Amino acid sequence: MIDMLSNTLIGIGLIFWFRGTAAMLRKRSVLYKLHYLSMADTLGSITMIAGLLLKIPREWPLLVLAAVCLAIWSTMLGYVIAHCAGGPGNSGRKP
């Protein structure tokens, strides 16, 4: 039962990853693409880490640390890149 739940979480995480990558093909602004990709990748990675936590519970400190670092760094990095891409007078939108 736990293996099935673990595999399901890992599969859901992969679906999030592919959905985030598919957003790159849409004709939207760069900032929209960056936001969608970073959110989908973060959710997918954390879901896969949860699946791995069920599969190998003896590694819980490392997996929890990975999930926390992933959540913090992806959020901060996405914000910094979006802020730098906007620049003065550039909202990141198409005219």
Image (cartoon, grey):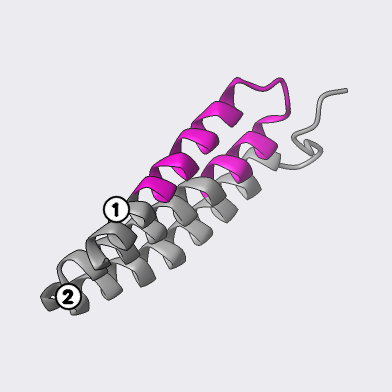
Label for residue 39?
A: none
- x, y percent for residue 30: 65, 31
Q: Looking at the rendering, in which quadrant would you find the N terminus?
A: bottom left
Q: Which stretch did the figure color magenta? A: 11-38
Instruction: Residue at 71% x, 20% y: name it.
Output: 27
- x, y percent for residue 50: 33, 66
**Neighbours of disc 1 within 10 Å: few (<14), some (14-19), many (20+):** some
Q: 25 or 44: which is nearer to us?
A: 44
Secondary structure mostly seen in the magenta stretch:
helix
Label for residue 7?
A: 1
Label 2: element kind: helix
Instruction: Residue at 36% x, 53% y: name it.
Output: 8
Label for residue 57?
A: 2
Q: Amino acid at mark 2?
A: Pro
Above or below for 6 versus 13: below
Kindly indicate the quadrant of the structure image that contains residue 60.
bottom left
Q: Amino acid at mark 1?
A: Asn
Instruction: Residue at 64% x, 49% y: name it.
Output: 83
- x, y percent for residue 70: 38, 61
Residue furthest left as drawn: 58
